[in-house]
Image (tube, rainbow, N blue to C red):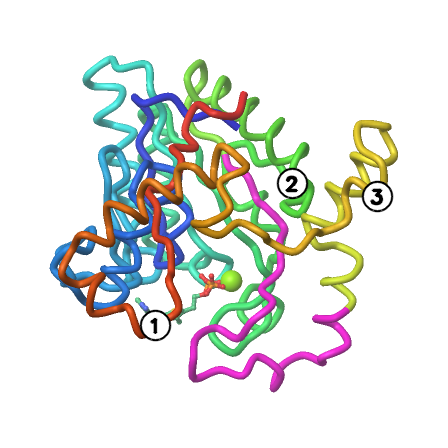
């Protein structure tokens, strides 16, 4: 997946991965989680509110980001940037009125918006068929075409995203429903097993997990052998500088050691917080 610099993106509260993708360092993310002023939102946003250039959050109000996403699409079109606005929301948000208002205006003006419904089958303590009459979220955009994608298959996601971007630029909005799964409860107060069985979670983890599926694909297509795929223990420490990444860790660690906060950390096991490798444009 490759998202050009000019594209904008907005999502709900599960935004850490997007922050990394838009170049925020792991250190700024962790600092934000700890409420520190060195965090990406100066410690005032916390887990749900992370921003970067062209990343518009991180929004805690379920569904509230979707009309803003349509607005981002309007901005892209008005300014003639050639970019698209990626607008994410969950299955729990998909039946809100404001989502449908956003669909309507984006189709009326044919805005370059890719709506992505991350259907992980559960909202807050409830399963999709208890809150939605039509659980085929990709069909719910009225005149907006929708595609159902297996969100657990990396290559499927990649192709769908590529197609949707092209489509949105030429024709206006499109809706992707990514079928995925939530392993954990909704939040810390939800153990995640009162509305589903442990067996269900286990079976997805063993049969449909994206890492398992990608590994199988690599083996089946002869790109890697099973032995190469086997997970090896992480041997990278600041004192083992055998690889490129380890060299980066070591350099960051040496710089960090000169800082006062790090000296106070000496009692703790060293944790190496490196600037995450910028992943935008890394994959094509
Ligand atoms: C307007 C609004 N109503 C209720 C909540 C409380 N709430 C937080 S998350 C959530 C469920 C969202 O489910 P979904 O969109 O499927 O996202 P998921 O947690 O599965 O990623 C609810 C009801 C909220 N944050 N905002
Ligand atoms: Mg959900």
Q: Indicate which label's residue lies in the foreground, 1 or 2.
A: 1
Q: Which mark is residue 81?
A: none
Rendered residue at 55%/32% (across/down): 145
Q: CA distance from mark 1 to mark 2?
A: 44 Å
Task: Pinpoint residue 138: horizontal percent, then vertical percent.
Answer: 58, 43
Identify whether 60 is placed above or below 17.
Answer: below
* Quadrant in the rendering for residue 171: top left
Judge by depth and name the residue closer to the eye, 197 or 69: 197
User: Which residue in the structure is indicated by mark 2?
Assistant: 149
Residue range in magenta is 175-202
Tags 3 and 1 in contact by the CB under 8 Å rule? no
Location of residue 205 (image quadrant): bottom right
- Residue pointed to by mark 3: 227
- Quadrant for residue 261, please give it: bottom left
Q: Residue at x 29, y 50 (%)?
A: 65
Q: Give the dominant element type of the magenta stretch: helix, strand or loop.
A: loop
Neighbour tally class for label 3: few under 14, some 14-19, many 20 plus, Cα within 10 Å:
few
């Amino acid at each position: 997946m490759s998202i050009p610099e000019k594209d904008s993106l907005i999502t709900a509260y599960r935004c850490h991965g997007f922050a990394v993708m838009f170049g925020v360092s792991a250190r700024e993310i962790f600092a934000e989680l700890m409420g520190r002023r060195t965090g990406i939102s100066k410690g005032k946003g916390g887990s749900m509110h992370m921003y970067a250039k062209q990343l518009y959050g991180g929004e805690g109000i379920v569904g509230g980001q979707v009309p803003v996403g349509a607005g981002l699409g309007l901005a892209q079109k008005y300014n003639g940037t050639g970019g698209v606005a990626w607008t994410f929301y969950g299955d729990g948000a998909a039946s809100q009125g404001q989502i449908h208002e956003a669909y309507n205006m984006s189709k009326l003006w044919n805005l370059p918006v890719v709506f992505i419904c991350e259907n992980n089958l559960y909202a807050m303590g409830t399963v999709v068929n208890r809150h939605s009459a039509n659980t085929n979220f990709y069909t719910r955009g009225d005149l907006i075409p929708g595609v159902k994608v297996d969100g657990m298959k990396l290559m499927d996601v990649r192709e769908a995203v590529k197609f949707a971007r092209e489509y949105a630029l030429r024709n206006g909005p499109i809706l992707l429903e990514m079928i995925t799964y939530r392993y954990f409860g909704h939040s810390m107060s939800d153990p995640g097993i009162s509305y589903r069985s442990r067996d269900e979670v286990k079976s997805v983890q063993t049969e449909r997990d994206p890492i398992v599926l990608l590994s199988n694909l690599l083996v089946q297509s002869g790109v890697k052998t099973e032995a190469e795929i086997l997970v090896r223990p992480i041997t990278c420490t600041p004192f083992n500088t055998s690889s490129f990444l380890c060299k980066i860790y070591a350099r960051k660690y040496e710089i960090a050691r000169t800082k006062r906060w790090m000296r106070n950390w000496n009692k703790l096991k060293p944790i190496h917080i490196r600037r995450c490798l910028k992943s935008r444009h890394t994959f094509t």
